[in-house]
């Protein structure tokens, strides 16, 4: 079974996590990293965005609550997976 929607992740017993990747460099200037991390509430996403909301589209729909940046990474962790989670969307 392919994991494509938020509902697929929920049914598989997985979780989706969020990490802000803002910081380190802005042009030639070094700036402070945000690095905010959070596990997203899958039920809230299914209620507000619909159960057919694609995991790949989440990156365009979230913003860091700490710094306001849209420069984020979305990852999925499934039970029994060998790695800690595959990152699925990033600007970098």
Image (cartoon, rainbow, N blue to C red):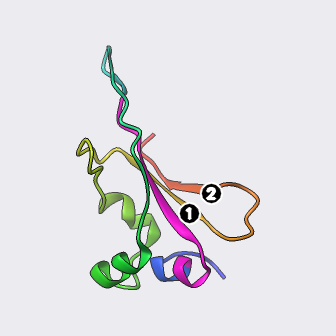
Residue at 45%, 69% in the rendered image: 55
First reached walking from the N terminus: tag 1 or tag 2: 1
Residue on which disc 2 sits: 85
Q: Which of these two is toward me, 38 or 81?
A: 38
- Residue at far top of view: 28
Closer to the camera in the image, 59 or 47: 47
Residue 65 higher or lower than 76, as above or below: above
Specify the quadrant of the image occupied by residue 66: top left
Q: Is residue 46 left or right of residue 76?
A: left
| Quadrant housing the C terminus | top left
The residue carrying pointer 2 sits among few (fewer than 14), some (14 to 19) or many (20 or more) residues within 10 Å by Cα, namely: some
Q: Residue at x 41, y 39 (%)?
A: 35
Answer few, some or many: residues within 10 Å of disc 1's Cα (few below 14, many 20 plus, some between 14 and 19).
some
Quarter placement of the N terminus? bottom right
Residue 64 highlighted magenta (yes or no): no
Mark 1: secondary structure: strand
| Residue interval drawn in magenta | 9-23
Q: Which mark is residue 40?
A: none
Mark 1 and mark 2: Cα distance apart in space = 5 Å
Q: Is residue 14 left or right of residue 89?
A: right
Of the pair 34 and 9, the residue shown nearer to us: 34
Q: Position of residue 36 (x, y in %)?
A: 39, 44
Q: Do the CB atoms of the residues marked 1 and 2 lie less than 8 Å apart?
A: yes
Residue beneath label 1, please? 76
Most distant residue in the left direction? 68
Task: Please report the residue visible at 68 percent of the width from the left and 71 percent of the height from the top.
Answer: 79
Measured as percent of width and height from the top left, residue 56 is found at 45, 65
Percent x, y for residue 78? 64, 69
């Amino acid at each position: 079974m392919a994991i494509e929607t938020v509902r697929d992740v929920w049914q598989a017993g997985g979780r989706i996590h969020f990490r802000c990747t803002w910081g380190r460099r802005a042009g030639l200037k070094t700036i402070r990293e945000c690095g905010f991390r959070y596990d997203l509430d899958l039920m809230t996403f299914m209620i507000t965005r619909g159960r057919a909301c694609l995991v790949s589209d989440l990156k365009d729909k979230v913003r860091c609550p700490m710094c306001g940046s849209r420069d984020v990474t979305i990852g999925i962790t499934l039970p029994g997976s060998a790695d800690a989670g595959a990152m699925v969307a990033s600007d970098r």
